[in-house]
Amino acid sequence: MDPRGRNMAVRTKLAAGNWKMNGLREDGAALARALVQRMVAAGAGEPGCQLLVCPPATLLTTVGGLIAGSGIALGGQDCHAAAKGAFTGDISPEMLADAGCTHVILGHSERRHGHGEGDTAVHEKILGAWRAGLTAILCVGETRAQREAGTAVEIVASQLAGSIPGDGVPDNLVVAYEPVWAIGTGLTATLEDIAAMHAAIRTRLPARTRILYGGSVNPQNAVSILGLAEVDGALVGGASLDAENFWTIARSCV
Ligand code: PEP
């Protein structure tokens, strides 16, 4: 049964907050405390979905300590594929797990486009995440030009095929559909386009795999987006930096 007593055969929705490169220790601690307060005040069964926060690496220990036991999960924003080694500036999946993470975001468009990561690198990172026992949140999505060219589904299908290792899809994979042009821009895909893309992704994944939507999700649009068939939650950037906004979005996961 999920937190609201529904049958687990129904996919439990996930509200994941990607804090990106935001927050010093005081900010991260205040945000974590504000979310924990809401969890405690709301009591069992709320917000009715799984909550995950993905702070910058420097805040993992602080935030992890504050959310421990609250039911809020901790995730990293990226990782290297290897367990250890001479990779200056990188963090291994094992290090994330050691810091208390259960999830890691991989293939985010800010990594794909800002750091030149392709499907092969993402594929290797997913294998690393699984090796360390983490759930990988694989991000896929088309650019504005690709949508306008009518190739959005083809692009996303090719990212899925290139990034997901092996033939079977294990339980510890979540897919996030994030149109690149909707991330951090205040623009969202139309409900029709989101529904159509999620349906197309579903045909390529097992029924148990959660498919999140991401791209300027906010308290105002969350109910309509999260109410769509095959939308199993949201990956939230900007709006996750405000506890009340993120909580409202999470409560929209019905
Ligand atoms: C993201 O970072 O994955 C994201 C969707 O950001 P935003 O909600 O700010 O568009």
Image: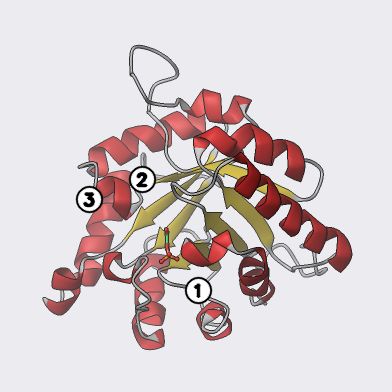
Label 2 sits on residue: 164
Residue at the far left: name it.
149
Q: How far apart, in angstroms, are the residues tagged by discs 2 and 1? A: 19 Å
Q: Please give left or right for residue 112 compared with residue 82 in the image.
A: left
Give residue 84's quadrant in the image: top left
**Residue type, numbered disc 3:** His
Answer with the quadrant where ligand 1 appears in the image: bottom left
Q: Residues within 10 Å of mark 1 (few under 14, many from 20)?
A: many
Give residue 219's quadrant in the image: bottom right
Residue at image point 41% right, 80% down: 195
Label 1 sits on residue: 230
Q: How far apart, in angstroms, are the residues tagged by discs 1 and 3? A: 27 Å
What is the number of the mark on residue 113?
3
Verify CB contact (< 8 Å) between mark 2 and mark 1: no
Residue 138 rendering spot, x and y as whole percentages: 41, 50
Q: Residues within 10 Å of mark 2 (few under 14, many from 20)?
A: many
Q: Please give left or right for residue 177 compared with residue 228 in the image.
A: left
**Residue type, numbered disc 2:** Ile
Residue at image point 80% right, 69% down: 4
Residue at image point 64% right, 77% down: 252
Vertical placement of 239 versus 85: above or below? below
**Residue type, numbered disc 1:** Glu
Asked if one can make out residue 6 in the rendered structure from this viewpoint, the answer is: yes
Residue 28 rendering spot, x and y as whole percentages: 62, 47
Residue 130 rendering spot, x and y as whole percentages: 50, 33
Report helix, strand or loop for mark 1.
loop
